[in-house]
Image (cartoon, rainbow, N blue to C red):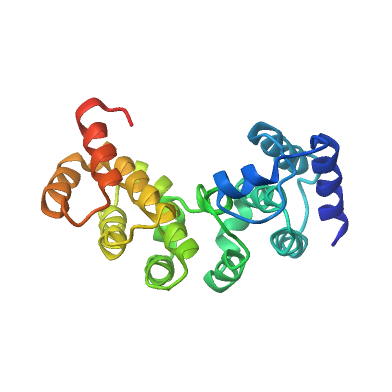
Amino acid sequence: MNKYHTEILEEIKALAPKRPDQSFGKSYFGTTDYYYGLKVPEQRDIAKNFKKKHPSITFSEYITLINSLLSAKSIEEKTIAGRIVENYTDFKRDIHSQMLERWLNGLDGWVEIDSFCYGLLDEDLILSDWKKWSTFVTRLANEKNLNKHRASLVLLVKPVRTATDERVPELAFQLIDTLKGERAVLVTKAISWLLRELVKLNKKEVKKYLKKNKNKLPAIAVRETSKKIETGKK
């Protein structure tokens, strides 16, 4: 554990309640990792304050920190790692896909996956090396690991919101099509999330896709996406 990890862990422990409910971490977050009981705003503040205190860490220091946090045993260390990755925007272009896949191996359950993957990619970053990123997320969707299935979908949630290049929503539909037969909640809710985000700029295409695949998609995805189309709300 390096000095930066130690600093973050001390802040986590200082904010943690005396007896956090470990059963909540397992039942709600879907992971057996230790749960310190921190609230989401507290985790965000730790990551935000870290960036303020250390605005000039090197890429090597940054990678060492993320590696250390993701090899830890608590939910909070892993979710804060994701927020740190999101905050250090200048380093995102230097993260290669092999490194990212190695990081994903240390994540378990929706909260760890979402905290790490949501916001990591945006349209500009994907388009800066389309072949690399499109190949990477497609490969994740075709692996046997359910956590990686969810990661492939969540990585595209933010990009499809603002996508001006048709390749981005097309890729999202391809991933959904690959995973539409999955019935694990970890994946079905992510399919629903991505479809609902696609509605903003691709409502006609989403309606057509729902009609064609109504009996093949998870029921929750059909229900929530249909509501989004009709009301604009989840």
- From the viewer's side, name the closer residue of 50 and 11: 11
Q: Is residue 197 visible?
A: yes
Residue 36 horizontal/vertical position (percent): 75, 43
204 horizontally vs 53: left or right: left
The foreground one among 215 and 142 is 215
| Relative image position of residue 13 (x, y in whole percent) | 83, 42
Instruction: Say which residue appears at 71% left-offset and 37% top-offset.
Output: 38
Q: Is residue 100 above or below residue 17?
A: below
Residue 83, can we see it? no
Q: Of all residues shown, which one is farthest toward the front?
A: 23
Which residue occupies 57% across, 47% down? 27
**Image point (34%, 57%), residue name:** 183
- In this picture, residue 62 sits left or right of residue 161: right
Residue 188: give x, y in percent of width and height: 36, 52
Place of residue 215 in the rendered image (x, y in percent of width and height, measured from the top left): 16, 53
Image position of 180 with respect to 210: above or below: below
Q: Is residue 28 left or right of residue 166?
A: right
Q: Quadrant of the N terminus?
A: bottom right
Quadrant where the C terminus is found in the figure: top left
Residues 95 and 77: in front is 77
Count of numbered badges drawn on the protein: 0
Figure quadrant of residue 161: top left
Depth check, front residue: 142 or 124: 142
